[in-house]
Image: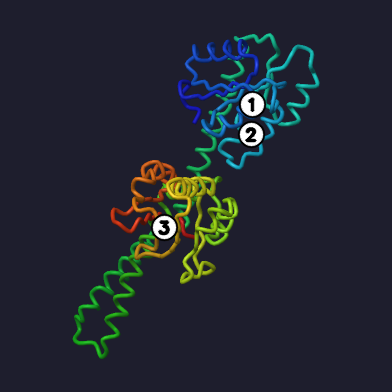
Amino acid sequence: MLKNKKMIKILCVEDEEDIRENIVDILRDENFEVFEASNGKEGYKKFLEVAPDIVISDIMMPESDGYELLKMVRESQDSRKNNIPFIFLTALGQKQDVVKGINLSANDYLIKPIDFELMIAKINEKINNASKIEVQHGQNIDNLKSQMANILPSNIKNYLDIISQTSQILMNEPYGPLPHRKYISDFEKIYKNSNKLRASIENALDGDVIDYRLNVNEKIINIKSFFLDFFGSLSQKYSSNIKLDSSVNFDELPMIKCDHIILNEAFKKIFTSIFQADEKCKILIRVILDHLDQIVFIFDTKSAKKIFRLDTVINESEIGKILDQQSCLFEVTNNEENTAILTIPSFRIVS
């Protein structure tokens, strides 16, 4: 995130417009991407929206002050955002402001009137420190990936190849007819499962997959609990229109390892889009495990409106971009059934 100065996003929160404009202009002159807000409440909304790399905030502001903003940032569920550098602006001599800010885990402070050269120096210091941490984190991940790749014996793939090839040969009955046809189906099972095992091993040792599995933002998610929590976050008006397929035993579904925030955001956009088009729309959620061992969520919608097309109601591209972060797929089927499909890849399934 903090690799190129031009890519650094800074959020400036200050209720005095002239001071805020001065800070914003100077930061933009330094080629930072700058966002602004006039109070803590507006600042937190902007924080969630743009995911800044650094926050510079005044302390005394209307609605929500700087302390409340810092507290909300630090308590944000998204660990990718809640530890960003936070710099307070304080009046000269207000030592108690500095102490309280530090106790709330502020990273630094600037005294008003602002020394802009010092401000830029402090920002660059925070950027460099964050970059060093990011580099170290990357090195630690690479080290773990290297160690994981050496856990299994180097010749295990050769053994699996022999099993696969031998079972395939035996299916063709090279030594004469087998006494029972069941032998052939058993050899076929051995062949298919040895190939699956080989693919699973290669998948598990793939660098990108390891990155996913070592992602600190991801959690083991119980699918049924996820849905119940999600429905609980909706108003009764809408949650009563959503049903889980009664033919599916959700308690027996495997768990998945995903970023809960990303998954929740995608589901929120799906249902919000549907109910904005028809607040009385009925939605049935089915779940299947497909032939690739992927979990597939199927959203069947039923609207009383004469004209209701899911492909025009839902922004498939927008939701797809959200789920791309988890290598999940989303599509609205091109038919009159008004069905959408969300697919969780097999490597995210926890058996």
Q: Quadrant of residue 39?
A: top right
Q: Residue at x 53, y 41 (%)?
A: 140
Q: Residue at x 79, y 16 (%)?
A: 94
Q: Which residue is mark 2?
A: 73
Q: CA distance from mark 1 to mark 2?
A: 9 Å
- Which is more N-terminal, label 2 or label 3? 2
Side (left or right) of 1 relative to 69? left
Viewer-nearest residue: 1 or 275: 275
Q: CA distance from mark 3 to mark 1?
A: 42 Å
Q: Which residue is mark 1?
A: 86
Viewer-nearest residue: 235 or 80: 235
Q: How far from the left and from the top, in percent, is residue 116?
A: 61, 10
Viewer-nearest residue: 345 or 152: 345
| Mark 3 and mark 2 residues within 8 Å of each other at the beta carbon | no
Q: How far from the left and from the top, in percent, is residue 245?
A: 47, 66
Which element carries disc 1, helix, strand or loop?
A: strand
Say whether residue 163 is visible.
yes
Which element carries disc 3, helix, strand or loop?
A: strand
Compared to 72, does 277 lie above or below?
Answer: below
Q: How far from the left and from the top, in percent, is residue 85?
A: 62, 27
Q: Residues within 10 Å of mark 3 (few under 14, many from 20)?
A: many
Which amino acid type is marked by label 3? Phe
| Mark 1 and mark 2 residues within 8 Å of each other at the beta carbon | yes
Q: Which residue is mark 3?
A: 299
Q: Nearer the viewer, mark 3 or mark 1?
A: 3
Q: Residue at x 61, y 13 (%)?
A: 17
Q: How far from the left and from the top, in percent, is residue 65?
A: 70, 26
Q: Residue at x 64, y 9 (%)?
A: 115
